[in-house]
Image (cartoon, rainbow, N blue to C red):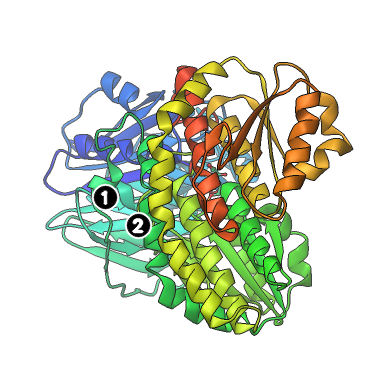
Amino acid sequence: MCGIAGYIGERDAFRVVFEMLGRLEYRGYDSAGVACINKNAIHITKDKGKVAEVEKEAAYADSKVAIAHTRWATHGVPSRKNAHPHKDCKGKIAVVHNGIIENFEGLRARLVKRGHKFLSETDTEVIPHLIEEEYKDGGGTEAAFVSAIKKLGGSFAVAMLSDKENNIFIARHESPLIVGIGNGENFVASDIPALLPLTKKVIVLDDGEYGIVGKQKVVIKKINSGRVVNKKPKTINWSMAQAEKGGFEHFMIKEIHEEPQAVKNAIAERTDIEKIAKKLAKFPRIYFVACGTASYAGRLGRGVLEHFGVPSNAEIGSEFRYGTSKTIDKNCAVILVSQSGETADTIAAAKEAKKNGAYVVGVVNVLGSTLTGICDDVIDIGAGPEIAVASTKAYVGQITSLTLLGLFIAKEKGKLDVVDLNKLISKLGGVPEKISHVIGDKEKIKRLAEKYRNVKEFFYIGRGLNYPNALEGALKLKEISYVHAEAYPAGELKHGPLALLEKGVVVFALVPNDHLAKKMESNVQEAKSRNAEIAVVSEGGDIKVPWVDPLLSPLLYVVPLHLFAYYLSVSKGLDPDKPRNLAKSVTVE
Ligand code: AGP
């Protein structure tokens, strides 16, 4: 949800921040812009469009300090005037912002009364005008910046340039912001991929902190007290190669090819998972909470526990925070699942659960993200940077971690003996090879996608542990192919949706070799009798998947669904990495 970049040092700042923006584009890509200081004046270049398009048209300005932004519109349509950076009346202050200023209407009305002229429809534009107003007190840039920030309600990650300063001023509240530490140069970014070729050392800003980023020095302070916070830089262990396409046409297909490795990486965290499972097993009530794809992983987590007779619940973050969270107390454990660790609704759910005394665990891909700072314990899925907006390898990593977690909890609760546990873990070790086998069949899936290129309606059906996969398959299709797709527990079709089935509708049926296979076969027949076209995913079906223990089948059965969504999107001439209207990290409510 918007990407922020900043640079100060000896390099060509204009070029550096545009390059950083290119690696943040998964956070939003409807407009982009840069502000830099050249000969003591602020120069802004911005427009509607993706980063590369804006960069092509941008007026180059020679500068050693710059801030930049790639936008995902909230307030105001994508346009040049709404693109960031925004400036004050005199053009002496430039601001980029990620988040939502909830009290912007009141602030704007007061500023207008004082004669400020607004040029955009954004909430962000109040910030430079507020700073301009605070400057009138004569306390200097830092004082003006901090007083303005204190007046903001809602969520923000902000970076500011003033023509009076050779520093970048930054602040955060509920939107991510990190500082990359270089040698005689420093960087500001929303997320790690922006920094990968530049530095491995980062300082993560926490909520309620602001910073002054100079060429040689970075000072972080508390917004409320002005107290200096001494923060040691952390070292990033992601590599640049992980954040590049590496010969693949899109990040999404590269990341699908990394699914076998995602399973291995998640298994590598087994010692931590086992430790956390021991703690979780003590709680009578366990909840999985997440959004989108991660919420389907949460449902799978619940399915694994239920398989062993351990009660649990799975909820969507935006619903949990205002509903179920009221019932949470110290007898509850809440497991938050999030690739980015920055999803606003998931973070809010974690905070509510914690406030109510629950034991809070994060299952996260980005260590150092906001969620990891809130949780009591964190399971690292270790999938590496996921750049495509559509989550694929992270989902596979999440369901691997949650399957392992479920097995260990079941063992702790006396529902699974050690011999069977070890057998299952050993079978899990064989899953990456089986996934590679499914990926090896991608040409067949590509042909299927070409065959179904003009289909307008898809259904995905599954039962038990594969119902979350049906949801995942349908979401992926909607997200990157813009085709309507619905997922149903197969037994539910006859309670209404069957009326929609007719010639021209395609039904994907997930039929692993488990105790529900016969029931699934009957549901497939019901759909066939209504003239729908059926694509069975099974050991001997239209899309073949190798045998796997039924408990581990979700890890394999989702792979063809990811491949199908990818190839359908490509066959329609779309960009699967950057679907319209979406952004990877959803940092607003
Ligand atoms: C997945 O393809 C989607 N882009 C989206 O549903 C995503 O999973 C969701 O926004 C949650 O993100 P998170 O895992 O970073 O919290």
Q: Amino acid at mark 2?
A: Ile
Q: Earlier in the sequence, mark 2 or mark 1?
A: 2
Q: Quadrant of residue 461?
A: top right
Q: Nearer the viewer, mark 2 or mark 1?
A: 1
Question: Which residue is at the far front?
Answer: 540
The answer to the question of whether label 2 and label 1 lie on touching residues, with beta carbons closer than 8 A, is: yes
* Mark 1 secondary-structure assignment: helix
* Mark 2 secondary-structure assignment: strand
Question: Which residue is at the far right?
Answer: 495
* Disc 1 packing (10 Å; few <14; some 14–19; many ≥20): many
Question: Residue 333, percent across and down?
Answer: 65, 75
Residue 178's label in the rendered image is 2
Q: Amino acid at mark 1?
A: Leu
User: In front here: 230 or 453?
Assistant: 453
Question: Residue 28, percent across and down?
Answer: 45, 36
Vertical comparison of 56 with 360: above or below: above
Residue 439 in the figure: left or right of residue 232? right
Vertical comparison of 208 with 118: above or below: below
User: In front here: 451 or 338?
Assistant: 451
Q: Which residue is mark 1?
A: 195
Q: Residue at x 29, y 19 (%)?
A: 57
Residue 579 in the figure: left or right of residue 412? left
